[in-house]
Image: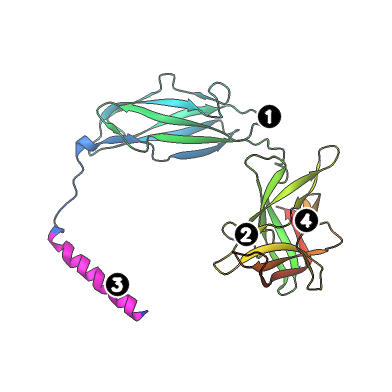
Amino acid sequence: MKRIYTIFIVAVFALLFAGCKDLNTIPVFEESESFASFPTAKFSINENSGQVVIPVEIASIDLVKTVVSYKIIDGTAKAGVDFTDTNADAVLNFDGTTRSQNIVVNIINRAGEYTGDLDFSIELQSATGLKLSLEKVCNISILDLDHPLASILGEYDATAVSSFDGTVNWTMTLYKDAKDVTVVWIYGLTDELLGDAKMFYANVNFDENGAIVGYTVPAGQVVPHNSSYSLWVVGNKAGSGSYYPNAPLSWKFENGVFTFDGDEPNSIGVLAVSPSDHSSIAGWWNRYDVPPSYTKK
C-alpha cells in the first residue's frame, strides 16, 4: 500500500511540474462557439401535474439576442390527445436580457384511463446566430397514475424473524413492470436482498372479481451479490435445514398487509450459490423461522 501511495505522489508532482509552463494560459471561450441547449435531457411528470416546464439556455460570453425554434415530436404520447404546446409559434425570443427561457407544455390528464407511461420529445431546430449543442433533444415521460396495481405499489414496512439474527425490520418496495400489468418487482424481499439489482418478480393473484388477493414469487430466481456468491431464494421448513428449490412462494394480501401464505414449506430462506453454477450451494445466507410480512406505509 505504501508503495502505491508513493508512486501516486511522485506522479502528481511530475504532472504539476510538467504543467507549470502553461499556468498563465487562460482558456478562451470564443463568441463564435456560443450555443443553445437543454440543460436537462430528460423529464418525468405525473399525468395530473398540469404542465411541464422545460428550460432552454444560451451559453455565450455576453448576453445575446437570438430566436430559438423547436419542434415537439410525438412518441407514445400524442399532441392534442396527451399534451398541447402553449406556444403556437414554437419559438423562443431572447431579447439580450436573459440566458434562459422556458418551453411550457400542457399535460392532458386522462384520469381513470390506464394508458401506461407515455413519452414525447422536444428538439431544438435552430438558434439565430448561434450553434445548437449536442444536448438539443429533451425527452419527457408522462407517468400514468391509473395503473391497475396502483393500490399495492410503493413502500412497505417489512418484518421477519431470522434464524440467525432474530427479529429484523426493513423497507420493501413494490414496482410496476414496464409491460405486464399482472407482474410486480420486489425490492427488499428479505432484509438480505437490498442493494443494486437485487429485485425479484412476482405474479399478482386476483379473485374472480378482479380484486388483488396476493402475489406469487416463481421458483428458481437468483440475483447477483458479489464475485463469490449469488443469492437464491427458496422455500424452507422453519426450524430445519430443509429447503425446497422448486416451490413457488406466495403471500396473501388483506387490509394493506402481505403475509406469507403456505403450509409446506412454511417459511423462506436465502442460499449462497456459485455465480457460475447455481446448483453449487455454499450454505444459508439467511433463513427465516417467521417469514417476512409487509405492511403498506
Determine whether, in the image, residue 54 is placed left or right of residue 264: left
- Left/right placement of residue 70 relative to residue 152 reads left
Q: Residue at x 78, y 54 (%)?
A: 258
Q: Are marks 4 and 2 in contact (CB under 8 Å)?
A: no
Q: How far is disc 3 from disc 4 in space, using C-alphas?
A: 53 Å
Calculate the distance from the C-alpha at mark 4 to the C-alpha at mark 2. Answer: 16 Å
The image quadrant that residue 129 belongs to is top left
Magenta stretch secondary structure, dominant: helix
Which residue sits at x=74%, y=63%? 234
Q: Which residue is mark 3?
A: 8
Q: Is residue 110 magenta?
A: no
Residue bounds of the magenta highlight:
2-21
Tell me the tag on residue 113: 1
C-alpha span from label 1 to label 3:
60 Å
Amino acid at the residue labelled 2: Val
What secondary structure is marked by label 2?
strand
Is 16 a magenta residue?
A: yes
Q: Earlier in the sequence, mark 3 or mark 4?
A: 3
Q: Is disc 3 placed on a helix, strand or loop? A: helix
**Image position, residue 138 (x, y; %):** 44, 35
